[in-house]
Amino acid sequence: MTWVKTVFIVGPAGSGKTTLTSTLGRYLEEQNFKVCYVNLDAAVEDIPYEPDFDIRTYYTVSKIMKEEKIGPNLALIRSVELLLKYENDIKNLIEYVKEDYDYILVDTPGQLELTIFHEACIKIMKLFSERTRSCIVFLIPADIIRSVRDIAFLKLMALAIRYRIDVPVITAISKIDLNPNVENILNEGIDVKDVELAGTERDLVYELWNTIKKIEKKQRIVKICSITGEGLEDLHTLIYEVFCTCGDLT
Ligand SMILES: Nc1nc2c(ncn2[C@@H]2O[C@H](COP(=O)(O)OP(=O)(O)OP(=O)(O)O)[C@@H](O)[C@H]2O)c(=O)[nH]1
Ligand SMILES: [Mg+2]
């Protein structure tokens, strides 16, 4: 096991993954860390960082659409399946960077369901997690958070991703500048007595919240704005803590 750390940036479409890959990378470089940038998104057009590995050098979603005469959604699925063809190149990249680099930042495909459900994506993530210390930064954009139930849902998703991928997950709220109320919502905490529900729904919420409380680690949610750089230091501290507390992830 090497010391290079892999950070997968995961989240729903448009949550700020690509921008965060760039801003977090720059932040780490300013702290004198050596950063390797990996782009696994074959659909993206412009990226604000210089990738060391870019899946688009092999294929793009628009090329797949033309060549296979299929629509964008199927082409996205194909683009994820095709990742496995380049398994050896990814292994070589990891071999190449593992002695020299401090961080590998992996920018993942736009569709969260493909990243966390598709076997090919899971296998590619495993290539990193079996060879480096790895964690996931799971982004949820602040503008879709309206209530404490949304926070509970976010925590459940983070737990589901942890369960699915078996890599530590840091939960982050991105685009914090778009919703100044998020801080208050986070501070509310989750308490089932506040839920205006009845019957089965109320029971469900009660059970879910209790489960979250029971099994989630006492880990705070980090709030990030890629425009101002707010939260990047906090995110870095959390990443550091995750690797410290997990120790040797072999
Ligand atoms: N206001 C605000 N906008 C942001 C922030 N981070 C990213 N954005 C914008 O959100 C949009 C989507 O950002 P991306 O980084 O491309 O998001 P993504 O998750 O990589 O998107 P896909 O790969 O298409 O799923 C862009 O217009 C960004 O400029 C932020 O912290 N605040
Ligand atoms: Mg992106």
Image (cartoon, helix red, strand yellow):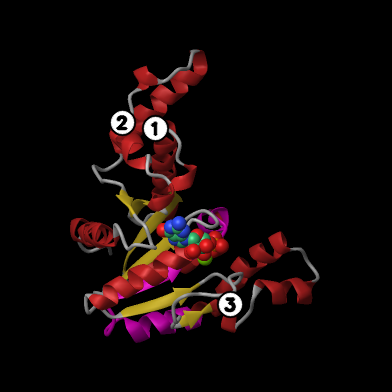
Amino acid carrying label 3: it is Lys
**Residue that appears at 81% across and 70% down:** 69
Task: Identify the residue under disc 2.
Answer: 188
171 or 100: nearer the viewer: 171
Q: Earlier in the sequence, mark 1 or mark 3?
A: 3
How far apart marks 2 and 1 lie (CA) works out to: 7 Å
The residue under label 3 is 85
Magenta segment boundaries in residue numbering = 88-116
Q: Which residue is mark 1?
A: 148
What is the secondary structure assignment of the residue under circle 1? helix
Q: Residue furthest right?
A: 69
Q: CA distance from mark 1 to mark 3?
A: 42 Å
Task: Characterize the local packing of mark 1: few (<14), some (14-19) or many (20 or more) Cα atoms within 10 angstroms.
Answer: many
Task: Find out whether the residues at labels 2 and 1 contact each other: C-beta distance under 8 Å.
Answer: yes
Q: In the image shown, does 48 or 166 lie closer to the viewer?
A: 48
| Residue for point 43% across, 55% down | 165
If the image is split into quadrants, where does the N terminus sit? Answer: bottom left
Q: Is residue 68 visible?
A: yes
Q: Position of residue 3 (x, y in %)?
A: 24, 74
Q: Nearer the viewer, mark 1 or mark 3?
A: 1
Q: Is residue 142 left or right of residue 233?
A: right
Q: Is residue 156 above or below residue 133?
A: above
